[in-house]
Amino acid sequence: MNKRSIPIALLGMSFLYLSACNSGDGFKTTKDGLEYRIVKDSASDQRPVVGDLLEMHITTRVGDSVLFDSRKLNNDQPLKFPLAEPAFRGDISEGFTLLTPGDSAVFRVSLDSVRKTGAQLLPWMKPTDKFQYEVVLVSVKSQETARQEMETQASRQKETDEQLLQEYFAQNKLNPSKTASGLYYQIEKEGNGSIAQQGQQVTVNYTGRTLDGNVFDSNQDPKFKHVEPFTFPLGQGAVIPGWDEGVALLKKGSKAKLFIPSPLAYGPQSPGPEIPANSILVFDVEVTDIK
């Protein structure tokens, strides 16, 4: 018997029954109104539950317009995110619980349902339109398994980053200071002001590059189209951990280089093609104001 042909409740889920009706285009509907079509049904019974870490490829579109493509935006790597409770009846999160690793599916969600949650639609979208999600579930991991794997991976990556940094320092004849976390910093100009405290607003000028010298962002270079100073609350998680730690070492008026190992930057996630996964980042930072 195909696992899709029996009530989902019998597979261990809490009384989520599927509608027996099938639309002409092959979509079925859950009792909460989520439209779905299973494209590939793998031979697995590992269904995700709320809190599990999912790895998934996702493409989102409305009509012919593609709004999001994880393969293009994440260097063909799957997105990783914890499965959340559905935010409304027929939410896409409900659909993820129908899948097992290796499955692919298409889900459709009413834009009107999304709009009622307070989300803003683009001007050209109509309430009668539908979000279409094309997904491939790569893996499902429990919170504990994901935590253990991340700790092991981070430990190995830390060793790799340390070796790369030491080679870089030797080649460039640098001798920066090191913190307990593995962050390296070199103060090039000592400021005369105070050191920022947690929660204060810190304003900086900066240029960021990967270890091979590729500049990926700067508020000093007009080509990045944001030459205004950057202000953020220190120690609130508004920036990567290496920034929160590194900027907290600097007085107002200081200029410094921060050498940030990948676990203190974006880790295994790539925020864009200019910053590959597990990249060590180098920042030139000037603290211009603290409030």
Image: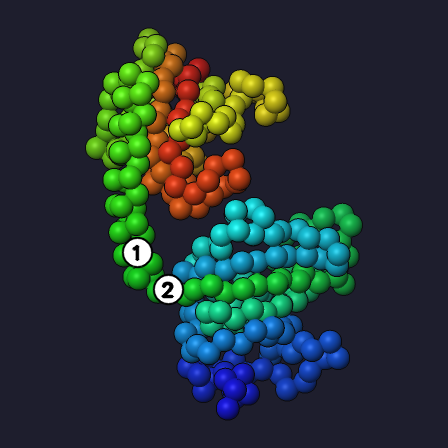
Residue 258 in the image, given as x and y percentages of width and height: 35, 24
Q: Secondary structure at mark 2?
A: strand
**Residue 87 to residue 213: above or below:** below
In space, the residues marked 2 and 1 are separated at their CA atoms by: 10 Å
Of the numbered discs in the image, which one, if any, rests on residue 274?
none
Mark 2 and 1 residues: CB-CB less than 8 Å, in contact?
yes
Q: Which amino acid lies under the numbered mark 2 shown in the image of this protein? A: Lys
**Residue 44 to residue 110: above or below:** below
Question: Residue 50's quadrant in the figure?
Answer: bottom left
Which residue is the site of mark 2?
Answer: 141
Rendered residue at 52%/23% (across/down) = 218
The furthest residue to the bottom:
1
Residue 119 appearing in the image: yes
Rendered residue at 71%/57% (across/down) = 62
How packed is label 2: few (under 14 Cα within 10 Å), some, or many (20 or more)?
some
Residue 88 in the image, given as x and y percentages of width and height: 57, 65
Rendered residue at 52%/40% (across/down) = 272
Question: Which residue is nearer to you in this view: 56 or 20?
Answer: 56
Residue 265 appearing in the image: no
Which residue is the site of mark 1?
Answer: 149
Residue 155 in the image, given as x and y percentages of width and height: 25, 45
